[in-house]
Image (tube, coloured by chain):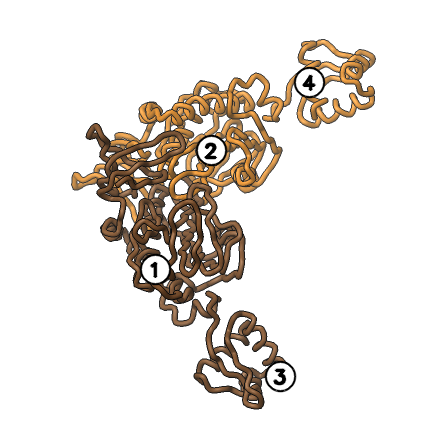
Chain colours: A brown, B orange
Amino acid sequence: MEYESLIIDALLEAGAKPVSGEELAGRLGISRTAVWKHIRALQREGYHIEVLRGRGYALKGLSSRPLEREVRRGLSTRRFGKRVIYYERVGSTNDVARELARQGAEEGTVVIAGEQTRGRGRLDRSWESPEGGVFLSLIVRPHIPPAAISRLSLLAGLAAAKAAESFSGVPIGLKWPNDLMVDDRKVGGVLCEMEGEAERVDFAIVGIGIDANCDVSVDIPTTSLKKEAGAAVDITGLIREVLRVFENLYEGFLRGAADFLEDYKERSQTLGKDVKILQPKREIAGKAVDIDGEGALVLRLRDGSYERVLSGDCIHLR
Amino acid sequence: MEYESLIIDALLEAGAKPVSGEELAGRLGISRTAVWKHIRALQREGYHIEVLRGRGYALKGLSSRPLEREVRRGLSTRRFGKRVIYYERVGSTNDVARELARQGAEEGTVVIAGEQTRGRGRLDRSWESPEGGVFLSLIVRPHIPPAAISRLSLLAGLAAAKAAESFSGVPIGLKWPNDLMVDDRKVGGVLCEMEGEAERVDFAIVGIGIDANCDVSVDIPTTSLKKEAGAAVDITGLIREVLRVFENLYEGFLRGAADFLEDYKERSQTLGKDVKILQPKREIAGKAVDIDGEGALVLRLRDGSYERVLSGDCIHLR
């Protein structure tokens, strides 16, 4: 694995010019046959490497997969991405991250998948996760009480929306609590899970899914950044941007700054609308007038009274 | 196991009178040798069964251990204790209950240990757990957001205090958040843990420890019910009482009733006192003036301002 990273570095350094197998073998202290084997492995990982008879290897294109070495290349974050674990295909990145966190994995660990076979969304729903999407889970270990987790979950939605918007140019809104929307079409979401005791969270898993280059048809209107922007999105770059924006917001959150909430509210599609909240045992209809310091949606009901809602499906009526 | 319960039932029915091996064998449809083996197993479980030559077996005393069949005998609860898992000795009942809950164990499942080898208290502390104590963990699956867990944790402390007081006659107070106290001596505590997503708890584990008949010396003043009451406490009966009181309060909690909080406040040793709250990175001193709807301790600081505290160690100053 390390040899492969060194080979990519050497090829990148040479630009599009070929580097001979002999030179690579010499620099790495391995045989030319070993170099060849690593080149083959890199090709299988999606790197476009040309083999030029008698002249060596030329890098024509990096892998488009969000491999650890690609995500980490040029990553400017301090915490998030120090450790990146990439799966071409996995059940659920949240499940993997949770298991790692239980075993003590550090804050900042990132689990990424090219595809999920049992992707999960909020409230036990499944989450379509075909190739072409962003599926990542971050391990965080904030010193906060469980009550603060709703806020963290809104913050994660905001970070994903800001990153997707600045990276793709597509304007992204937020439907409470944290659906990423392009107008009324869903383009991503957040699943924030946690373990801890009554007084403080032990760890939380922030799962972020963005329909970058895939377009799934489910029972609600969805879209992809590719469809909206008219061009495929560099998934690896988008992930780096998500990590960067999340880290900035998260560090403010740890310092107790609440200004992300204003930022969130500006992006909210829900505020000002008549909405219906569906909970397992009841429905609440009202006008969404605020999101409070705890992340609750504040509704003004028909009779003029107010109700705070912390959970449920939100339907925009008009 | 079932045969052993049937044997105990038969012996109990006979009062102190002996029941012959032949009769037991006939009633159970097994051999007299098999009856004898079950009697031996019961004796090893702590039952006092006399073997009367030629006349059979007489029950002189039940096991003092909180075995499943003893806890369930005469238990009047609906949810809690439908399934009881007893260990003579285990690492931590909370850990066992958590693993069971992850595997889908139902609400109401109870894990009990005679002794814990890695007992845990709040905030990652260890919890001395020698024989003679009550160590039990309840699995609950309330449909609540994580923010409500602090309240559940106070409710558990209240339930344990009420049960221990009514069962032993020793007056029990509560030090915020949920230490069980006899004057200034600690006699029990609660560790409430949970897993879930930002909007709702998947399950919580309510761990309750009461120094019934043991007396451990640690760096804070402690006591036991036995010491205070002057007589050993029937651990099995105490556990049944904890389950009964907890279930009552918990059902009110699920209906949204908040009256347990008034009950809690009446028992609070902390309210009205000058206290110091120790958190990992700061200390807060003030007068404890209230416990709010979220379970936070409300302090009036020196400058007259108020601060809500959700976590930390509470020290009573006077």
Q: Are marks 1 and 4 on the same chain?
A: no
| Quarter of image, res B60 | top right
Taking the image as shown, residue B176 lies to the left or right of residue A194, namely left
Residue drawn where x is 82% and y is 22% of the image: B33
Q: Is residue A204 above or below residue B260?
A: below
Label disc, if present, on residue B141 of the rendered structure: 2
Residue A93, percent across and down?
A: 49, 54
> Residue B8's mark?
4
Query: Looking at the image, is mark 1 or mark 3 earlier in the sequence?
Result: 3
Mark 3 and mark 2: Cα distance apart in space: 60 Å
The span from disc 1 to disc 2 (Cα, nearest Å) is 42 Å
Q: Identity of the amino acid at label 2?
A: Arg
In this view of the protein, which residue sits in the foreground, A46 or A92? A46
Q: Foreground mark, 1 or 3?
A: 1
Q: Amino acid at mark 4?
A: Ile
Residue B134 at what x, y percent from top left?
A: 52, 29
